Amino acid sequence: MYIVLATLGLLIHQESTLELPVKVSKSASIACFLKSGDGGGTAIHLGERFSISWFLTSLHEVEGENTFEISWFEDFGLDSSFSKNKAGSIPGGIIVAKDKDADLALLRFDNSRYPIPVPKIPKLGQFLPPKIPVWSVGCDKGFPTIEATQLTGKKLFRTPNGQAFHWETRDGTKPGRSGGPLINEKGEWIGLCHGVQNGKGYYTHAIEIRAFLVKNQLGWALGAE
């Protein structure tokens, strides 16, 4: 099944009355703004080891680009908003691993000269029933914003060379949100924004993310070490 990428189409967000849980607010701090070439998107901060900061994003956001910069902002408050002022930035990132089927890319940044907060990564939720509330975090405005939506199912997308599981959500997504986290009400990071099709949002499933990170020796970011 073909997915129209989130960077290619703009959908009107349907406002939700869902209250933002405190655990969701805290988990949302893993989202950062990723400047990739002349474009912008979202990345997830996995953590730091040995003066290297690691980030996960959607492959289509960075493929073919050579220059990257990560910026982070103040944490979400209970009013569902981030500060628009940057708390810090790191230039000079490089791509170190890719998964075309799952649309994942791993980036590393040398942060030896740049202090960066290391947010706690929630446990990856792997099995969830459909029709539960979830929250999508992304930098469609150049800084992180959060939008409430609802799971509608788990889908297996086939590509010319393989296949990958995705979450489907009731609402579509917007340009710049690709690479951002999907978070459940427990504060668990369960997916990564990939794209939109027929008004539905699609997020690379947590099982694909876990396999990708473990394969690339980043199991520590998931509490696997």
Image: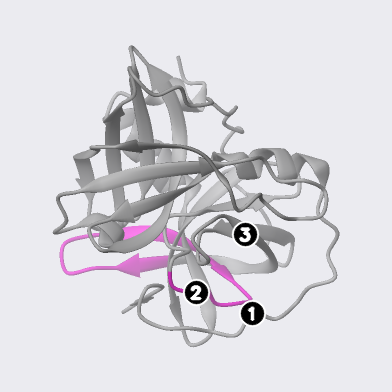
Taking 91 as reference, is 71 left or right? Answer: right
Tag on residue 13? 1
111, 166: nearer the viewer: 111
Asked whether the beta carbons under mark 1 and mark 3 sit within 8 Å of each other, the answer is: no
Q: Is residue 165 magenta?
A: yes
| Residue 191 spot, x, y in % from top left | 51, 52
Q: Which residue is mark 2?
A: 174
Of badges 2 and 3, the one in the foreground is 3
Quarter occupied by the N terminus: bottom left
Circle 2/circle 1 CB separation < 8 Å: yes
Read off the residue under disc 3.
145
User: The residue under label 1 is which amino acid type?
Assistant: His
The correct choice, above or below, for 23 with respect to 54 in the image is below
Q: Is residue 93 left or right of residue 148?
A: left
Q: At which x and y percent is residue 116? A: 48, 26
Q: Amino acid at mark 3?
A: Thr
Question: Which residue appears at 57% of the width and 29% of the height?
Answer: 119
Magenta stretch bounds: 156-175
| Residue 196 picture quarter | bottom left
Q: Secondary structure at mark 3?
A: strand
Q: Secondary structure at mark 1?
A: loop
- The crowding category of the residue bearing disc 3, from other C-alpha atoms within 10 Å (few below 14, some 14 to 19, many at least 20), is many
Under mark 2, the amino acid is Lys
